[in-house]
């Protein structure tokens, strides 16, 4: 709550716990005039019919303490020029004047001449919103309850939460990358265990295939030409000898066998089919090599991302451990109460699963813990409490030496009954 003006904080901090021991209200909403001297502790149960002024009585206390920020559109009784609220506590006199437009002026003086500072600034040091309605804690969302508890215990995890959120996002991205890399790794075809570490040279094998094909073609041409020559000799050599007569001597007996021998002696060279098979085998092996290298690269990347995720998890766990350490060291209003990042826990279970009696105890204890100086509670929806929970709340107020102003409908159990904007006669 924002403070306006100056305040003697040292003097305020020295104040003992305060409750209301005197209340004077004039022309506040439906109230005409009310003067009360309530018990300093316990419950003031305000009863009466609807529109009798019960809420106006609760509001008069809230207006006196909260000032302009707590004013409705029409805080002054219809037809009156101003309203006045005076509260007296064990150490303070509070007097507030309120105009119909909601403008207000307050004086806060300490008894025995105690100098505290400017009125509203002093009041702002004494209460929080839970003073006005401790059951508001039960209506908060889980995250808001956690924030209220942190505020009460001084556990400001803002920096830790920011760092944790940053680490969590980094881990999320690392895990997403890890899953993506693992999916790519799983899609790589299997390869033999004995796959070499490097690819073979395809250009050298291609050159071998080309050389084998050239030699094969050249040998075939030679054999074809030699066969044509042999056939020609066999066919035409006798006729040549006959025409020439005995005068020409040709070694016909040696020529044909010599040609056959020479043709058979031609080198075979490399087998083109084998060379082509070797090339195809090398291409398959190289595919395995590429798959092996890609798999090794992806595995290294996946391992790196896994290590990164584990390190980030370790850092997140350290932050959670630090928060847990601080939380356990903090003084919480109720035994068994704790909280994590998003919600309250009671004895290890979510707070929303606790019984209403437990919730009521926690809410009241929160109000007391957050308002050690001004120990009053204003509860408008007292009608929502059954007899058992109402009795429990009153007992808690007595034990805490606090004061509960509780609004109900009807007169049963009421200590103050409102009627036509005033305390009912005879009460």
Image: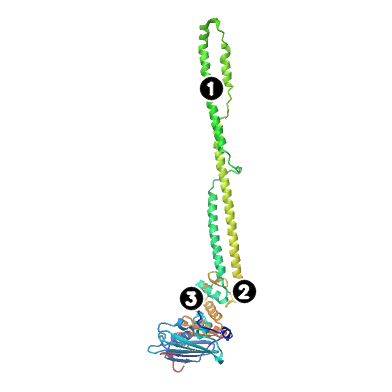
- Residue 278 picture location, percent across and down: 56, 35
Mark 1 secondary-structure assignment: helix
Q: Name the quadrant containing residue 81.
A: bottom left
Q: Earlier in the sequence, mark 2 or mark 3?
A: 3
In front here: 67 or 363?
Answer: 67
Question: Visible in this render: residue 354?
Answer: no
Can residue 318 be spotted in the picture? yes
Above or below, 177 against 419 in this view is above
Q: Is disc 2 in contact with disc 3, using a CB cutoff of under 8 Å?
A: no
Relative to residue 286, is residue 104 drawn left or right? left
| Numbered disc total | 3
Whole-angstrom CA distance, mark 2 to mark 1, is 101 Å
- Tell which of 38 and 117 is nearer to you: 117
Residue in the image at 54% along x and 24% along y: 219
Q: Which residue is mark 3?
A: 139
Give the residue at x 54% y 37%. Answer: 280
Q: Which residue is mark 1?
A: 222
Expressed as whole percent of the image width and height from the top left, the position of residue 33 reads: 43, 92
- Cα separation between marks 3 and 1: 105 Å
Q: Which mark is residue 329?
A: 2
Secondary element under disc 2, as helix, strand or loop, is: helix
Position of residue 9 measured from the top left corner of the image (x, y, whole percent) = 56, 83
Q: Is residue 185 above or below residue 415?
A: above
Look at discs 2 and 3 and give the one toward the viewer. 2
**Is 350 situated above or below 403?**
above
């Amino acid at each position: 709550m924002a403070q306006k003006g100056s305040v003697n904080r040292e003097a305020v901090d020295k104040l003992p716990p305060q409750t209301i021991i005197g209340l004077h209200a004039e022309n506040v909403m439906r109230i005409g005039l009310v003067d009360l001297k309530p018990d300093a502790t316990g419950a003031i149960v305000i009863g009466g019919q609807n529109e009798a002024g019960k809420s106006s009585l609760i509001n008069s206390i809230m207006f006196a303490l909260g000032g302009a920020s707590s004013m409705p559109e029409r805080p002054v009784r219809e037809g009156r020029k101003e309203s006045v609220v005076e509260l007296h506590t064990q150490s303070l006199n509070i007097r507030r004047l309120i105009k119909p437009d909601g403008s207000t002026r307050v004086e806060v003086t300490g008894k025995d001449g105690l100098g505290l500072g400017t009125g509203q600034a002093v009041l702002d040091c004494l209460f929080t919103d839970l003073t006005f309605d401790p059951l508001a804690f039960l209506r908060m969302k889980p995250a808001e309850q956690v924030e209220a508890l942190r505020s009460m215990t001084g556990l400001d995890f803002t920096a830790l939460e920011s760092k944790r959120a940053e680490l969590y996002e980094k881990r999320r991205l690392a895990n997403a990358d890890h899953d993506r890399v693992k999916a790519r790794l799983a899609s790589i075809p299997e390869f033999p265990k004995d796959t070499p570490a490097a690819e073979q040279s395809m250009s050298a094998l291609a050159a071998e295939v080309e050389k084998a094909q050239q030699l094969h073609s050249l040998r075939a041409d030679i054999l074809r030409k030699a066969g044509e020559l042999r056939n020609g000799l066999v066919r035409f050599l006798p006729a040549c000898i006959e025409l020439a007569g005995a005068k020409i001597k040709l070694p016909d007996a040696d020529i044909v066998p010599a040609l056959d021998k020479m043709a058979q002696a031609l080198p075979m060279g490399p087998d083109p089919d084998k060379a082509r098979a070797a090339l195809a085998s090398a291409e398959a092996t190289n595919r395995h090599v590429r798959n092996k290298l890609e798999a090794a690269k992806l595995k290294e990347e996946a391992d790196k991302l896994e290590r990164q995720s584990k390190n980030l998890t370790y850092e997140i766990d350290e932050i959670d451990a630090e928060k847990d350490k601080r939380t356990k060291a903090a003084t919480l209003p109720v035994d068994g109460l704790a909280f994590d990042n998003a919600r309250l826990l009671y004895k290890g279970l979510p707070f929303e699963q606790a019984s209403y009696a437990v919730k009521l105890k926690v809410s009241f204890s929160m109000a007391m813990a957050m308002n050690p100086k001004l120990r009053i509670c204003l509860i408008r929806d007292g009608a929502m409490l059954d007899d058992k929970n109402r009795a429990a709340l009153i007992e808690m107020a007595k034990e805490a030496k606090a004061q509960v102003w509780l609004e109900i409908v009807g007169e049963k159990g009421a200590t103050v009954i409102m009627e036509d904007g005033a305390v009912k006669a005879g009460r």
